[in-house]
Image: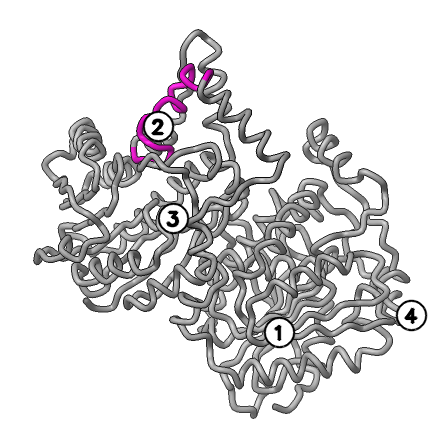
Amino acid sequence: MSQAVSRAAQENGFFSHDGARLFYRHWPVQPGVSDSGRVIVLLHRGHEHSGRVQQLVDALVPQDCSAYAWDARGHGYSHGKRGDAPDFMCLVKDFEAFIQHLQSVHGCQQEQILIIANSVGAVIASTWIHDYAPCVRGLVMAASAFDINLYVPLAKPALRLGLRLQPELNVTSYVRAGMLTHCEAEAKSYETDPLVTKNISARVLIDLADTAQRVVADAAAIDLPVLMLVAGKDYVVKTAAQQAFYDRLSSALKRWVYLPEAHHALLYEKDTSVAFSEIRKFIQECYALAMPELKQRVIQSASAQRELQLQDLPAPGIANRVAFGVQRLMMRHLGWLSEGITLGMQTGFDSGASLDYVYRNRASGKLGIGALIDRGYLDAIGWRGIRERKQHLEKMLSLAIAAVPEGQTIRILDLATGGGRYLLETVKRFGNRQFEIELRDYVQSNLDAASALAKQLGLAEQVRCRRCDAFSADSYQDETRFHIVVISGLFELFSDNNLLNTALQGVRRQMLPGAKLIYTGQPWHPQLDMIAHTLTNHQGKPWVMRPRPQAELDALVALAGGQKLQSLVGIQGIFSVSLAEFAAP
C-alpha cells in the first residue's frame, strides 16, 4: 500500500442526532488511483479541529483510501459554544451520527473503516466502539486522554461543586504548546491557529473523566484491533489508565508502542518516524485480517466466560457487607412506606409490574415520608436509564412502523411484554394506521395489565395477549408473520446465550421478509454488587445481572440472520436499544 502525496480536502457538513450542523473534511482517493473502498477516519485532539490533520492524511493515508475528519461540536467550524457540549456522551453520539452519514451519503462500508484518534478523540472513538459495537477494521489511539493530569489538588471535586453553583462553568487549558511537542514549527502553528480553542466546558471535562473510567474498567468488551501510542513525557494525560485499558482489551491484535521522549502531541512531534511507521504497518495488518467471527464474539467474550462465575454470588468485602446490610435493613423496616419498593419486594424488582411503575414515574408512599423515599428510589441511576430506554424504544418503534408501506396492516409481536406500555403508547400515536398486535408474557398478571392498558387506550380490538415462554421453541409454531418484533428487557435478565438463541431463532421463523427486530441490551451497570446483594428478582432470588457487551448481543442477532442498522445508547451507557433487519425467514 503506497503512501499518498498531499491532496486537497473537500468541505461539507452533516446534521447530528439533535439537529446540530457539524463540519467535516473529505479527502477523496487520489485521481488515477483505483479506489480500494477503504476509509480512514481521523479524530483531532481536544481544543483543535480537522484542518490540523491535513499532514496526517498526507503521511498516513494510502493513495487508494479515502479519508474523513470532523470538527467536533464546539470546535473549528462546527456548531456550538466553543469547547462546549451538553455532555461528553453527546460527542460520542455525534460520532455515531457522523459514521451513519458517511455510510448513507458517501457509501462507506463500516467494515472498511479504520480510525486514527488522538487524545480526547481517542476516548470518543473507544467509547463509541464500546457502546455501539461497530464492525470497523481497527483503532489507532495516540496519547489517549483517559485520565487528564489536572495538577491542582482536589480539582475534580472542586469542578463538580463549581458546576452545581455555575452550570456553564468553563475551564481554560493550562497546556502551552511547548508542553505538547518538541517541534518549534508545530508549537507555533498551534499557538497562532485562530480556530484552536483554549476553553473546555467543566461539564464536558467531568463527564469525560467519568466516561473514561467506565470504558477503561470494561475494556474487555472491545475485541477489535487496537494500536496504542503512548508518550513517555506526557504532561497532559497519565499513562496508568492507558495501560489498564490496554491490558484489559480482548483484541487478538493489540499493540503498545511507548515513545519515551515524546510529548502529548506525539503525532506532531519533532521525530514522528517511529509513530508513523507503526501506524502504517498497523493499517496494513488490519486490512489483511479477517473480521472477527460472530461465534467467537458470542462464545469467547469476557462476559460469556464469566457466566458461570455469576451463578455464585460472591461475598462482598467488609465495607460493602456493612453498607449492603444497612440497605437491606432499611428496606425491610422502611421500604413498606414506598410504593415502588413495596411492589419490587412483592413481585421482583425486575418484574413487568415494577418496570411499569418506574415508567409512570409518579412517587407515591405512606405517611408523607414514603413519597420522598419513593422519589429517591425512582431517581436511582438504573431507573433513570430504564425511562430513557423507553424513550429510545418508542423512537425505534416509530421508525419501524413508519417503514411499513401505507395501506398495510402492521403486525407487531412483543416478547416478554410486561405491561406493554412503551408499545401501546407508541401505537396510539399512529391512529391513522391499522395494527394487529400480539403481546406475549410468561406472567399472567403482566398480560392482564397490558390488556387493561390496551382497553384504556382504545386499542383492545387490535391487541391479542398470549401467555407463553419466550425461551421455548414451542412458542413459535403458529403461522402468523410479523413486520416488527420487539424484545425489550428480556435478554438482560438471563446469562445463558442458548436461551437467547432459541428466542431469536424462533422469532426469525415468524418474521416477514424485511421485518425489523427491536432489541434492548445492558452492556454494563455501575451498581451490580449493590443490586445483587440487596434486591430480589421475579423468582425471589438475588438479582444477579450479567451485563452483555453490545458486540456479543449484536453477534447473537447476526447469527440468527439479522443485520443491525443502528443503536441508541442511554445514560452512562447502561442500556441500549438497537434496530436490526431480517432479509427473509
Distance between mark 4 and mark 1 Cα atoms: 32 Å
Query: Residue tagged by mark 2?
Result: 357
Q: Is residue 563 above or below residue 171?
A: below
Q: Nearer the viewer, mark 2 or mark 1?
A: 1
Query: Residue tagged by mark 3?
Result: 492
Q: Nearer the viewer, mark 3 or mark 4?
A: 3
Region rendered in magenta: 333-352
Residue visible at 17% across and 50% down?
410
Does residue 425 appear left or right of residue 161 in this picture? left
Q: Which mark is residue 184?
A: 4
Helix, strand or loop for disc 2: helix
Distance between mark 3 and mark 2 Cα atoms: 19 Å
Q: Is residue 58 visible?
A: no
User: Crowdedness of circle 1 by 10 Å Cα count: few (<14), some, many (20+)?
Assistant: some
Residue visible at 64% across and 91% down?
2
Distance between mark 3 and mark 4 Cα atoms: 53 Å
Q: Quadrant of the C terminus?
A: bottom left
Q: Quadrant of the N terminus?
A: bottom right
Distance between mark 2 and mark 1 Cα atoms: 45 Å
Quadrant in the rendering for residue 78: bottom right
Does residue 185 appear left or right of residue 226 in this picture? right
Q: Position of residue 522 (x, y in %)?
A: 44, 49
Q: Nearer the viewer, residue 66 or 163?
A: 163
Q: Position of residue 374 (x, y in %)?
A: 45, 21
Q: Is residue 351 magenta?
A: yes
Distance between mark 2 and mark 4 Cα atoms: 62 Å
